[in-house]
Amino acid sequence: MKIFGKMLLWFILALLNAFLTWAAIVLFTNDTIELGIIMIIIIFFIDFAVINPKGYPYRYTIPALSLLLILTVYPIFYTLKIAFTNYGTGHLFTRNQVVEQLMNTYVTDADSKPYSYSVFVHMEDFAPTDEFVMVFTDGEKRFLAEKPQIISVDQEGNTSRSVAQYREITNGNVVIGAAQYEIVYSIQNEDEIMAIEGTQNGKRSVYQYFFSFDDPDTLSNQRTFISNIYLKYLDTAELINPERSLVRFGTVYGFRKLVDAQKKYRIDKELYEENGKINERTVLVNQATGIQLQEEDGTFYEITPLGQRIDVGGYRGYVGLRNFEKMFTDSRFTGPFIKILIWTFLWAILSVLFSFVIGLGFALMLNDQKFKGRNIYRTLLLIPWAVPAFISVLVWRNGFFNETYGIINKIIIGQWLGMDAIRWLGDAFMAKVSVLIVNVWLGFPYMMMVCLGALQSIPGNLYEAASIDGATRVRRFSGITMPLLMTSVAPLLIGSFAFNFNNFTNIYLLTKGGPAMSDSLTNAGSTDILISYTYKLAFQSERGQDFGYASAIALFIFLIVAGISFFQFKFAGTFEEVNRG
Amino acid sequence: MRVIKHAIMIFLVVIILFPMVWIVATSVRRDNAAFSTKMFSNRYTFQYFKDLLLNRKNIPQQISELKKIANLSTDYVKMSKEELLASFNKSEAELKQQMALSKEQIIKSEQYVEEVVAFAKARTGEMVSRFNALKDEEKMFFETQLTDILASSKSLQFELTNELIHSFEKVEGEEQSRYLALIEKSSPDFVKVFIETEQEFKNVANRIQDAYQGWFETVKNNVSEGLQAELETVQSTFLSLLTPQEFSYSKWNREINLKGYKGLTTELQSELTSEQLEQWTQLIESFQEIAKETDNLLKTYSTKKEEIIQGLENQMKERNDVMALYLSLEEQRLQASNNLVRLENQIESEQQKLMGFEERMGLLNQQIQGAQYEMQELRSLVAVEINQDNEYKEITSDNKTVEEVLSALQHLSETIQELGDIPVADLELLSLKESMDWFVGKKEQLLMNASDDSVKNALDLLKSNINPIREDLADLTLLVEQYNEIRLRVDEYTQSLNDQRVLLNDKQAEIELISSEYNSIVLERRNIEKVKGIIRIITLLEQTDDYEALSAYNGAISSFINNFSTMDHPAKALLSEISAFDKLVYLDRNYAVETSYLKETVDEIEKVLTQFDAKKESYINLIHANVMVKTSELDAIETLQKTAYNRFSSELNRIARIASDLSEMEAYQEIADSLERIDKNIFESLQYWIKKPEQQFMRWLINTIIIAIATSAITVMFCALGAYPFSRLRFKGRKYGLLFLLLIQMFPIVMGMVALYLLLRFIGQYLPGFGLDSLWGLGLIYLGNIAFNMWLLKGYFDTIPNSLEEAAMIDGSTRFQTFWKIVLPLTAPMLAVVFLIVFMGNFNEFVLASVVLQSPENYTFAVGLQSFSYGPYQMEWGLFTAAALIGAIPMVILSLSLQRYLVSGLTSGSVKG
């Protein structure tokens, strides 16, 4: 039995190893190196834990640590890497991807006539298959194109490039490569094509007339044509004929007509010198003007004959410490950044302070055993904390702080007090006040409970002894209650500080960062804290997302918060506590 | 003391919990909370809860469902024909049922409407008699007002009379007589003329009537009934035309003579004898004469009227002039100011162009600079060469190049000269010119040294530079031309600008001068309108015998108040009651119309449905074969529903609003109950028709609960497993490891989203159910809450003494077995706490969820609620708060009942001892 169990274990281990190795390989080839590295770390860890007898304790931690590695360490890693790049809007893809995109741009001569086309499909059992050929004409000559071969597919599985050959139809025959096509015309009308016979390698297929945009009789086939044939093969097809120009869909005509086209750029190789060595790199040249694209700062620029520089695509690249410099030395960014930093600290400190004070106040009032109904009050006061934050915050924002319809402005201030409406969320200062109000409202119950618990653990005889010695209530409070309270509650306060420092949800839901600061390039708002500012930079900036800069700030936040927590641990002596047993 | 404490506590609790109360109150409000002035409403409904929980599709949704089937949308694309038929039938049946239900609600309310109507009828009589009691007082009030205004200003007189003369023909009866009375005071001549003319007309009418009657008696017996009637009609029309206001000869000719008499003549021919016919012809000829006479009468009257008016206008001339002057000055001022703006804009745009030019010139400048440098270099080179030996040399035949170059340079130099002053590139050009001139000057030496190699090279280089320079200069010349043009234009515009400014100031000054006079005239002219208004009121006042007239009187007073100001007339209170009462009457009148419209619509739709039923099978055959089919019946139903709804919904809503407003007034307490019922039934009925947004609330809730439970369970297991060694075993990293993990977890997960997004995308490619936009993918991310929970559990493990495990191990169990069978059960309370904390956290989490989840059916509760927050037109308060309540209540109950454990669990990790 034991041997069977052991064999099972080894089998599972082997399976796990194989799976993780495969995953790591796939990740490496997909360019997500960081995750691949994490996978490898996990493999080693698991192997060590299971195989090495000294690794016994670690076996318990395998699931937890694997998750931690994947879900926390990997993002840190990744963010670290991005902080040194210029990843963001305008620099989203790798250079190769951008080059490929540029190679897939075409120019169409405005004067060229579009082609009308008809599609002939091979039928099986009276149902259309996706084997087809296409005949198109510019009114004078007719051409036949084969079914395109799919060259590349994008990440959602859609075809991103396909290629086919086409040739002119002469005397009812076409030869493309190894295949021969014979056109079968209608008997009544010599111009009308009924079907096309194709022979390749001895195999013969017949293609029946199926669809043409200009023929209303085939309208009922349009849906099938588009879903089975056009979207899969023709949408991005390049129809090539060495003696003529490229033909494709994809212009304003959409699927209705084909047009002549040309690739806008071609690739040239250029030699350049670097550190005494001669290197080669690829450059793109505009085929029409012959002007080479300039590359600067991670962006491709096209120079028009008039001397203008146009941005045609950017790629992500390593930029060193630039993002970090931006934070502190670039005056356009530093201003808002410092303001936000200060406000974040202020916000965290004030939130903790006010909610602690209020919570303590309630706790003191409710600590009286003889106070009837104290449990009811306590339960009622706990409700703000119990209701999910995203509900309460939305209610506060829309139902209370709304300038025109909010209850506060409309009824309390408008009708009862008769004053002007306060711009709760519109004015920078008032927005900060509103945000603090809501956060304190959400947070004080927790503080109250904690204080209640801590107050109850203070022995009553201390108070008795103090009052015998003639201490006033205030003296008792400051001398006994506060110190004993602080020892148990201090760590929680710091924890709460750290929590509020990064309290993205409340700020974002209430004001989305608040009334915008007018002097900011990057959408900073007056109630933005570091984390919401980072979020906006990374995901929402209309001026362009700047992941690089956002990642740098995130690391900065991480350092601050982890640093504070580290000092708290040290201060509270929690390191020693670990040493038990 | 206690009491004070209680009072304070209650006060604070009420303030703090007010938002919750508001949520509950709003979730049952019928009207949209945002726009009401009352904090709490008594129009309540549970409709929102029903919508969220039952999610029954109402009429528009059923119709769109039917259309979806017809278009073979994604849900139906894989169905067989039988299934399609079944779907059709189902939707149809529900549609019919919904319509029937809405009809039912309307019918329910009809009985209440009857009550209300009866009440209304009873009350009208009362209103009228109450008013009649106040009638005399009212009359006196207004007549005093009138005399006051008339006495207030003498200069008003002429204008008033003028206005009254112009408009007295537009009013009739009592009003007209009052107008005339007023006119008489200043212009008795006119009144005399008018009365005389009226009398003349009356005489004419009598003459005509006598003549006609005379003739008619003789022919009465021959004429048929029908013709008699026709004759009567023509006659009475004739007579009605005979007033100064109505009469004109052409009108008479058209309406009476040609249409009437001539037409009748042919008919009469068959019935009368030739003698009688003669008499008839004579009669109408005489009528024609009379008509012409009357026309002259009218002309005389008009002329006299014109004279009188002219006289009045002469009196008013000065004032009219002031008005005209003011208006024309105002117009000129406006035009000047518009011109000013236009010119300013033009100047700005031209200046922009100038900037553009300057930029381009700058660019050229750089090129010229380059050429300039080169030329400098060549110059110094050549200078060295030719100065070296100043001996005389033969001029060789190799001088063609020199000639060419030098003449070209000369030419260029002249071009530069012609350019004259330009803002940019001045200095460069000058130095360039200088260099060129230098070369030209050294012609002899160059010729002498033409065979010198370096000189030759220099000349070649010069030659190659000439063309580019020439081109640049050509460009520059062009630019300079255009630049100067624009400069000129700008100067012109600036000049015009200044002119307009002067003009504007002048006009404004002139306007200032006459503005006070103008304003006083305007004020006085308003009083004229006031007079007319009061006269109208008084006239209506005298006719108030029934409710309709009373309503009309009320209307006149309201429009007077709208135009001028309110007055405290005696019947004011009563009239406001009447305004309210009018609403009741409105309700009465319109209710039947709109509800029958609703019922008709229902019947129409059902009819079309039966038509559709007949064709259903053939439609299904086509649809199933993926052919695009136009289901005209469904389109018709959709149009019917939309147009009908637009109309009766706004009206019925209005009626409902009226009903609810009235039900709160004291005067209507008797029928308050019925009114409230009407309000409610209309609301219920319309709920079947209102377009409601699609939502999948129950689904979201279930999604959230499943994910939260699953992730919490897994997290607890893994964390317990992981925390165990930190508490019990010895290994490297034990001392600082856990804290290190805690620190690592401080990284803001919000920023990790990019990385996690990539992670999910990668996973999604290989495990479809776990990728982006899937709940399990989100769950995977939620599993990251490791460190803190491990810390808590480890703390708890520490409080369990080692002895139990040691004893067990002595007895032969493995470590793991002690963990599994001894430690874990003892930790159960803490496990429960951790489970709850993680559950609550994941339930409420929404940032990550909103990034990962994209399609509505995968939303969690938190993300879905956000979508209510941004409805298509405005925030759907009721729906939002109802949804929030349904989601929040379980969480609240959960937290509250376990509060003690939660708090103790959170503090146990840090409290020492």
Image (spheres, coloured by chain):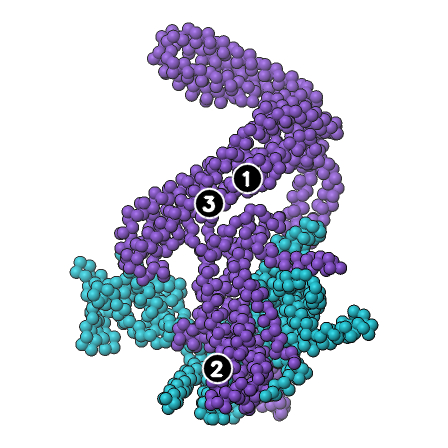
Examine the rendering and report whether any part of residue A372 can be seen: yes
Mark 2 residue type: Lys
SS for dot 2 = helix
SS for dot 1 = helix
- Give the left or right position of residue A38, taking residue B565 as reference: left
Q: Which residue is the site of mark 3?
A: B685
SS for dot 3 = helix
Q: Which residue is the site of mark 2?
A: B821
Residues marked 3 and 1 touching at CB (< 8 Å) = no
Of circles 1 and 2, which is in front?
Answer: 2
Q: Residue at x 46, y 45 (%)?
A: B685
Q: Position of residue A196 (x, y in %)?
A: 21, 67
> On the rendered image, what quadrant is the N terminus of chain B found in?
bottom right
Q: Which residue is the site of mark 1?
A: B673
Chain B tint as drawn: purple
| Res. A349 image quadrant | bottom right
Of circles 3 and 2, which is in front?
Answer: 2
Of circles 3 and 1, which is in front?
Answer: 1
Q: Residue at x 59, y 50 (%)?
A: B35
Q: In 3D space, how far apart are the residues under numbered discs 3 and 2 (Cα atoms)?
A: 62 Å
> On the rendered image, what quadrant is the C terminus of chain B found in?
bottom right
